Amino acid sequence: MTPAAECTRRVAALREALAARGLEGALLLQAVDVLWLSGTRQNAALWVPVEGEPALLVRKSQERARAESPLGRVMPFPPSKELAGLTGGARRLGLTLDVVPVAVQQFWTRALPGVEWTDVSMMVRELRSVKSPWELARMRDTARLLSAVIRDVPSWLRPGLREVDVAAELEVRMRRAGNEGSPRVRGFNQEFFMGLAVAGGAASAPSYFDGPVTGRGLSASSPLGASVEPIGRDVPVLIDYTANLGGYLTDMTRIAVCGTLAPELRRAFDVARAIQDEVAAALRPGAVPSRLFTMARERAESAGLGDRFMGPPGAQARFVGHGIGLELDEVPVLAPGFDAPVQLGMTFAVEPKFVFPGLGAVGIENTFAVGEGGGERLSDLADDLLVAG
């Protein structure tokens, strides 16, 4: 469970940021934000005043919330007519408008007449982006689980398995190792299962997800990830999976092959590894995310692979890494427009990839923490090809 000192520190940081914006408090309504501040993921709203004690208002389950949260005020969700009294007449309040539905905002507007709402989405996300030593330890635990499962792929991968067979084998092994399930994703309509196991031409199929490789999926309803295509010899099998322990995620990609890779694919794989290493070495406090993306893109272009970098031609993702923690799509992103320097303790999944339509996708991905001497890798799995018989 989340230590009391962690929740105390997080609430204090949020209060300081709210006060700096001239706000009197904030309502946290999205489950992951409430989890981060209160230590429990129950059906609850969290009221955080700049002055006074926070209150966790629980719809269900109050018993679990009281057992799991170190906050002092954990109480049943009151009738709506009592909510104004709970906030003490505060008028300038923060709300995370990136995730709170309009209908929910309207409920709170009726319950708290006269309140002026200010969007504090980025404030909360930026506070969450810097991980404490306790959080980094949780992410290392998650990385160990994921590394152990992927390390064993060559022992059971073989030609003729379908992509979905490979995905199912990975997922059952991860579940047995303690994986808690699919990662939480903040972006609107961005759904993601536990990961991707895609091979050959199916790996280059386009789809909705904001990533370099999406896969064909199983239907128009689920157009992401593994398909029923069989895996042949000498084709790259891209294994891009997340793991989740205690809510904290790590993200990893490895390339497996039954046989050998074609020379152009092997060369692109080596370039991806070099880009990852350069970006990771630059993940020091003060590095600018947009410049790291530019560095990675220029390295791909100089290798003659710019049109295949981070996606197939015409459908390329405009990033080379993303923040990660309690959610898969945290900030900052190593992408254009992210110009604020990174800070010690931020965590990034760095994932340079190349897509060759009809042939497949190759690349690498590891999760790193920003360190004084460069990115600290949270996993211990080598970046080598996973070669099966």
Image (tube, grey):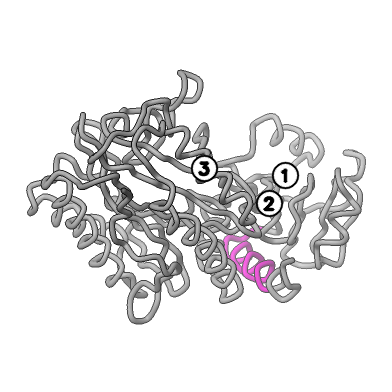
Q: Are marks 1 and 3 in contact (CB under 8 Å)?
A: no
Residue 138 falls within the magenta-colored stretch: no
For badge 2, the amino acid type reads Leu
In front: label 1 or label 3: 3
For badge 3, the amino acid type reads Glu
Tag of residue 169: 3
Residue 21 falls within the magenta-colored stretch: yes
Left or right: 372, with 378 as reference point: left
Q: How many marks?
A: 3
Residue at x 74%, y 59% (from the top left corner) = 48
Q: Are marks 2 and 1 in contact (CB under 8 Å)?
A: yes
Q: Is residue 58 above or below residue 143?
A: above
* Sooner in the amino-acid sequence: mark 1 or mark 3: 1
Crowding near the residue tagged with mark 1, few <14, some 14–19, many ≥20 C-alpha atoms within 10 Å:
some
In front of the other: 257 or 64: 257
Residue 211 % position (x, y): 36, 41
In front of the other: 124 or 84: 124
Instruction: Tell me the residue that label 2 is attached to.
Output: 93
Indicate the secondary structure of the residue bearing disc 1: loop
Residue at x 81%, y 66% (from the top left corner) = 71
Q: Is residue 200 above or below residue 40?
A: above
Q: Which residues are magenta?
A: 9-23
In front: label 2 or label 3: 3
Left or right: 300, with 150 as reference point: left
C-alpha gap between disc 2 and disc 3:
48 Å
Residue 70 % position (x, y): 81, 68
* Sooner in the amino-acid sequence: mark 2 or mark 3: 2
Instruction: Tell me the residue that label 1 is attached to.
Output: 115
Crowding near the residue tagged with mark 2, few <14, some 14–19, many ≥20 C-alpha atoms within 10 Å:
many
